[in-house]
Amino acid sequence: MPDTTWWKRGIVYQIYPRSFQDSDGDGIGDLAGIRSRLDYLAWLGVDAIWISPIYPSPMADFGYDVADYCGIHPMFGSMEAFDSLVREAHARRLRVILDFVPNHSSDQHPWFRESRRSRDDPRRDWYIWRDPAPDGGPPNNWISNFGGPAWSYDEATGQYYYHAFLKEQPDLNWRNLEVRAAMFDALRFWLNRGVDGFRVDVIWHLAKDPDFRDNPPNPGWDSGQPEINRFLQRYSADHPDILDIVEEMRGVIDEYEDRVLIGEIYLPIDRLVAYYGRDLKGTHLPFNFQLIQAAWNARDIAALADEYERALPEGGWPNWVLGNHDKPRIAARVGEAQARVAAMMLLTLRGTPTMYYGDELGLGRVEIPAEAVQDPWERNEPGQGFGRDPQRTPMQWDETPNAGFTDGTPWLPLSQDHETRNVEALRRDPVSVLNLYRRLIELRRATPALRVGSFRSVCATETLLAYERESDGRRILVLLNLGRSEERLPPGAEAGRGRILLSTHLDRGDEVVSDPVLRAGEGLVVELD
Ligand code: GLC
Ligand code: MG
């Protein structure tokens, strides 16, 4: 029996809800907006949408500071709007994945307001409170991911609380069993409403060293890097106790049929794969961010694909991510031509692909003038290029003002070229990057070797990456030219005759070839004889 599990066979599409489609003219995307664009997503051919947080929030970190785990921020709509989004998505066979942010809440969450009331409040232990160091300073040297100390002093009760991110995002104490129970009920609340799973925010942060030891200095740090990197996160993250918590969380997911648990994890491959859990009882998909972090060179990418394949536990399903709301867009990193190669890579590697809204338009880095900056990280550590606004700008739909995103003033600027770079214009252009994405998605869906077949590296030079996917005797060769000149497989590595199924240039199809020459920045999918 072939494995038909949807999250193994399907493609996930991330929506940053503030930026997808505004329906009420406030310049900020919302649920009704997403609902009005479901037909586009069905046309594109993706299987699931993951929506970044839509819960009530003071928006200190744009929704990653949750003030109520079981509500909808009025800016995004109502619970009815949410229910109808899920209903209409399901009617189009689109699954809906929510973002779950368990590591920290907003400082405006009632739990934290109660927790900071007094040292013996019943909620005190729901967060992480510590006495000052003997000199009155913070309890240890841990640093916030957005720069500055990770501890804030509370005058009223004379203790510090810990926040791995902003001071408005106090970390919950997952060692407290009441916290777990309350958070698991929040998961059930959404599962009962029909959501198909969760992407769990910073899951590798959930438990810290019980002794709160100082982190050791990072010998590789230099001042061009974020302040958080000054220390190795040895004691503040990836604690072995996290696996127990993740297994409990998975237990909640498994109370329901056919749901998925995805974990956000920035760790080296050997640590990442631990999050599949013992006997695969952890996350179904620990997000694999290797493509986001890799230098754009074929040898390195081949090496990490091989390392990843080797490291996967027996039965663990792989996955690949090309972009998200935290990292510079792929076209900004590697340029427009190579972004097409990257698309082919993402959609032909073995494992569930996750794509980021707007990448299918080839959106690059959108310049954000100083007065338009929104991201708190950019405000904390300005001018160093850490800010995330450039990859969070509005989706571009058509030639109307603001590219059809809003009738009001968009919360972040659109890219300068939005009059030509938008869904409508690119849909009309048969060789656009948008049509490339669509064709790749279609091809992946129609080709078992790409969807579920095995993976084998064929060859990697500095600029040429070749791998083979195989299922039931059907062999697909993927050739990717990461360079600026013509490429072909080197002598000895030739793969034989086949038929071209797709070129990134969308101008060669059905050609029978033997070891074809790839043009600069060209990728080919070839079905071998
Ligand atoms: C995750 C989110 C990021 C957020 C942070 C704190 O990394 O993806 O956007 O700022 O967690 O919640
Ligand atoms: Mg709106």
Image: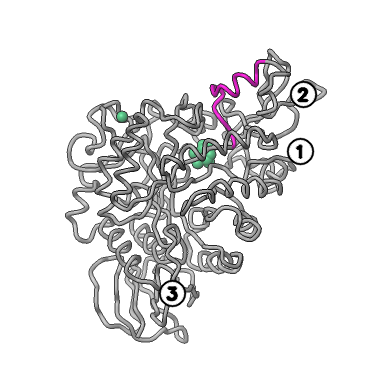
Amino acid carrying label 2: it is: Asp
Q: Secondary structure at mark 1?
A: loop
Residue under label 2: 131
Q: Are marks 2 and 3 in contact (CB under 8 Å)?
A: no
Front position in the image: 89 or 256:
256
Does mark 1's beta carbon lie closer than 8 Å to ligand 1? no
Q: Earlier in the sequence, mark 2 or mark 1?
A: 2
Q: Which residues are magenta?
A: 103-117
Instruction: Judge whether 495 appears above or below 74 on screen.
Output: below
Front position in the image: 162 or 448:
448
Amino acid carrying label 3: it is: Arg
Residue under label 1: 210
Q: Magenta region, mostly helix, strand or loop?
A: loop
Could you tell me residue 367's position as x and y percent? 37, 38
Amino acid carrying label 1: it is: Pro
Q: Earlier in the sequence, mark 2 or mark 3?
A: 2
Could you tell me residue 399's position as x and y percent? 18, 41
